[in-house]
Image: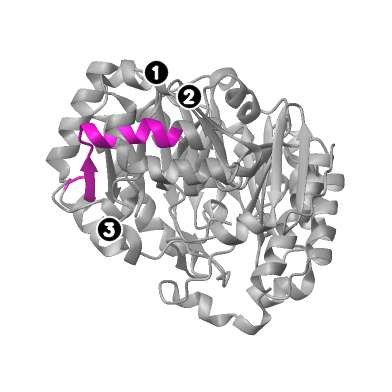
Amino acid sequence: MLINRSSRSGTLRKHSILQQTITFDLNLIQRYNQSGPRYTSYPTAVEFHERYTTESYRHQADLSNRRGGPLSLYLHLPFCDTVCFYCACNKIITKNRKHAVPYLHHLHKEIALQSALFDSTRVVEQLHWGGGTPTFINHDQMRELMRVTRQHFNLADDDKAEFSIEIDPREADEKTIALLREIGFNRLSLGVQDFNPVVQKAVNRIQSESETFAVIDAARAHQFRSISLDLIYGLPHQTPQSFSETLDKVINDASPDRLSVFNYAHLPSQFKVQRQMNEDDMPAPEIKLEILHRSIDQLTAAGYVYIGMDHFAKPDDELAVAQRNNQLHRNFQGYSTRSECDLIGLGVSAIGRIGDSYSQNHRTLEDYANSLDKNTLPIFRGMALNDDDKIRRVVISTLICHFFLDIQAIETEFSIDFTEYFSDAYKQLEQFAKDGLMQYDAQKIVILPAGHLLIRNICMAFDRYMQAKTKQRFSKVI
């Protein structure tokens, strides 16, 4: 690892590992640390509208079948038995496990309705259970949900499948892990957030190191192929030292294949549960930046590759390999390796991407159930992309995944003059170049080390909807 310090009105450090480079320029980060989309889609979900109906979706499914190709499934299981105060997910807090019974009945019905729209020869190469807490349901319910999914969709064999599930270590043990492997899962994602007991108490998530590492050990014993851990910085009582201690334990004792180090977005006006935390206990912006700074130091020194945004991976992990091979993709679960898959969202509030369209299911259990009781797909909004959306989606997705854009390839694919088409963006690009975030010419855009952490800002320059979004509430880019 190479570390440089510069007196350029701030601190500058450069990390180089396996050709991956991150520059932490405090001055630039403070200047550019505005709110903006995470670009898990383009256009983002705030542009979805209710003019997109079930008939719109059926039309897109038909177009998708004509194109063919593999599929990806996302199943949303919204239940949790305790609330984490930082959480912004669509969730239902209950200790009554019986509440899952009617929900699973409707989810099974939706799986059947969705499968009827897609060619049965299309193989599901990716599958993900998210939440909520997917392990809220019992072992028999897990078996049945996967059985129903296999009954209606053509799931890939284990050696070709990327089947993942989000795990709360407080809701799983060795028997749970063994069952998940048996029914087809080969990847785990675990929520950790922070091991510090003071932080855990402040966010109402008490989770011991021993139960966390026990789940990881069980996953390795049962030959799960990838283990990912989620951490959050910016929570109450966190300090650079305390978070560094958590990260040390994660790196040395867990050694996950992937790590997500998320910036906590405090939006109490949108997520009432966040009001349970005391804002005075939260680290100041400069402390948050130091936590991020140290995290980058520790992870790159330990050999992790910076994938982008909040994600790190070991060099031989599929995400790192996909990025090196220009096959990385971004969807509503974050970075993904299967860019060619159409994504079918199943469950309350689930979002899908079918061809050149996005769709979202009803966000309340009542509306979701009412649609399925009428044998109707529970879609309540979405959008079909126009030609401009498609062009900008490719540009933004390529930049956020690969930090590089082949301008001539874009011009050839879409029959445009790039400079003319994006003339409104060039003033911002010039400023980015002056600030050392990027370089560009007629052939390409290259994001420089100082621009890697600020890639969301660069993507915003190509976002046609950004002016209308200024009144929307997004998280800070750092």
Pointer 2 or 3: first along the chain: 2
Q: Would you identify the image quadrant in which residue 74 lies? A: top left
Q: Residue at x 32, y 44 (%)?
A: 43
Could you tell me which quadrant the N terminus lies in? top right
Pointer 2 or 1: first along the chain: 1
Q: Residue at x 77, y 34 (%)?
A: 16
Cα–Cα gap, marks 2 and 3 = 28 Å
Q: Would you identify the image quadrant in which residue 341 lies? A: top left
Q: Which residue is mark 2?
A: 444
Q: Is residue 205 visible?
A: no
Are the residues tagged 2 and 1 within 8 Å (C-beta)? yes
Cα–Cα gap, marks 1 and 3 = 29 Å
Please, is residue 185 above or below residue 463 in the view?
Answer: above
**Secondary structure under badge 2?**
strand
Residue 16 among magenta residues: no
Q: Nearer the viewer's eye, disc 1 or disc 3?
A: 1
Looking at this view, is 311 or 455 the one in front? 455
For label 1, count other residues whose C-alpha is less than 10 Å away and answer few (under 14), some (14-19) or many (20+): some
**Secondary structure under badge 3?**
helix
Q: Amino acid at mark 1?
A: Gln
Q: Which residue is mark 3?
A: 468
Q: Residue at x 34, y 48 (%)?
A: 44
Using the image, tell me which numbered label, if any, was put on residue 408.
1
Q: Is residue 296 visible?
A: yes
For label 2, count other residues whose C-alpha is less than 10 Å away and answer few (under 14), some (14-19) or many (20+): some
Q: Tell me which segment is drawn in magenta.
A: 375-397
